Image (cartoon, coloured by chain):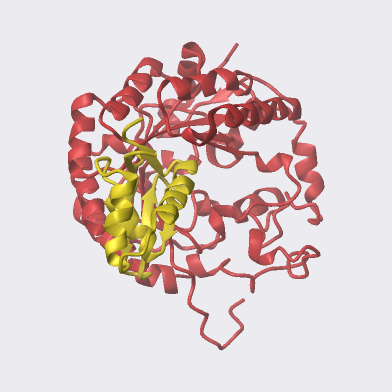
Amino acid sequence: MNRPRLADGARLQYDDVREEHLLLVPEGAVRLNETAAHVLELCDGRRSLEEIAAALSERYQGADVTDDVRELLGGMRDHGLVVDAAA
Amino acid sequence: MGSSSMPPPDPPRPYTLVAELSYRCPLHCPYCSNPVAIRGERWRDELETEHWTRVFREARALGVLQLALTGGEPMVRRDLDELVAAGRDAGLYSTLVTAGTLLTPARAARLKEAGLDHVQVSIQSPDPEENDLIAGVRSFEKKLAAARTARELGFPLTINCVLHRRNLDRIEDLLRLAEELDAQRLELANTQYYGWAALNQQALLPTRAQLERGEEAVRRFRERVGPRITVLWVLPDYFEDLPKPCVGGWGRTTILIAPNGEALPCHAASTIPGLEFPDVREHSLDWIWHEADAFRRFRGTDWMQEPCRSCPLGRQEEDFGGCRCQALRLTGDAAATDPVCRFSPHHDRVVAAREPERNGEFVYRTTRPARRAASSTSIRTP
């Protein structure tokens, strides 16, 4: 996973009725915690996984989150929610 | 039911609004899930753009996330671009459920521009001639063109194929076709016997051997292709012995609005006698969801009779008694346990229905009044 982006048609949305972050996909919705929502916002197909981790790290007082980001995005990829723009 | 003085607990928030924009359709599929009564006057008076726009806003406020723009054929609506934009403005994720024959590159581009999220194209069979025979009209090439157009514009694509005895043995070709069209999802919906499909049960009901071969083909495909293509495979109820939670449970996940503004809890609810369906022209969606009798009648578990009431598997909150319309059709009582359930005293009727007298004759779907269409709705199929 070099330059992750959301799969075609996947759309991030904050649901102000249920007060939660969602990834809307064809005929479904994936509930996201705040961190996952931040990560996916950064998945624009241009940033590398390392750049995403670095940007996120700033929000979390410099902690190294690379492994967490890799795990999250790997799981998302296995469900067809995220694809590699570099592939 | 109705005897308690306690106010009902808050129902769950709905997820899906099924917007049946029109029952007009260039196709005549003999398993159409629209009511057989679409031939009557009741549904001709279609909602205006501004009604739908308000309904979309109210749906989002209630919690709805998914908007299915369907019909009939939703593309017969001349205000479809506006309706798509209204859905997007409301914050809904929209799916166009189309037969594809009217989805030209120019119209698809406008829908993309308006904010449409997802396109679902129906295919009746992967074999061109069989596709056209089932649809009752030449349409196969246009469907493939529509699917390709959708992908070229970057829409996620679902291919939907309703399965039955005639096309089930072509499932491998269908899986290949979906892959070739670069679909992200393939919905293999085995025919459920309501509406027009109930009229055509003898021509459509598959054999158990066909279903087993189909299921095996799907399993191999999933193994080979992985998450790139999601394949949904839904067994027909008649071959199960525990019911499904119809539309996720009555009045729990879904609101369906018919072209004339009637709000229903499911596709077939209009067949249930004694239910009055509120008109969105006269009521807010919030009132309809919380207060309308049609949505409260079979919501939750209080209405249940035996054997549901003391279900030995404790599945009351899992299958919600199954399908009300099926209970009505097979037992005469919409409040009975869905006879698909092996504990239903009427389960033998489902077992018997698995081996019907089979014949190949289709009664084609039509919105034309019965008088004029009588001579052309049934043709002998080879």
Specify whether A47 is left or right of B372.
left
Q: Is residue B247 above or below residue B216?
A: below
Q: Is residue B54 above or below residue A72?
A: below
In the image shown, does B368 or A11 lie closer to the viewer? Answer: A11
Q: How many marks?
A: 0
Q: In the image, residue B3 lies at what x, y percent?
A: 61, 83
| Quadrant in the picture for residue B319 | bottom right
Specify whether B335 is left or right of B116.
right
User: Which residue is depicted at the point 32% across and 32% down?
Assistant: A86
Q: In the image, residue B313 lies at what x, y percent?
A: 78, 62
Give the quadrant of the C terminus of chain A.
top left
In the image shown, does B16 or B41 lie closer to the viewer? Answer: B16
Q: In the image, residue A74 lies at what x, y percent?
A: 46, 45
Is residue A65 visible in this depiction of the protein? Answer: yes
Q: In the image, residue B102 lies at what x, y percent?
A: 28, 27
In the image shown, does B286 or B315 lie closer to the viewer? Answer: B315
Give the quadrant of the N terminus of chain A.
top left
| Quadrant in the picture for residue B196 | top right
Q: Colour of chain B?
A: red
| Quadrant in the picture for residue A38 | bottom left
Specify whether B246 is left or right of A81.
right
User: Which residue is depicted at the point 30% across and 43% down?
Assistant: A48
Q: Colour of chain A?
A: yellow
Is residue B64 visible in this depiction of the protein? Answer: no
User: Which residue is depicted at the point 60% across and 37% down?
Assistant: B198
User: Which residue is depicted at the point 47% across and 20% down?
Assistant: B177
Q: Is residue B125 above or below residue B25?
A: above
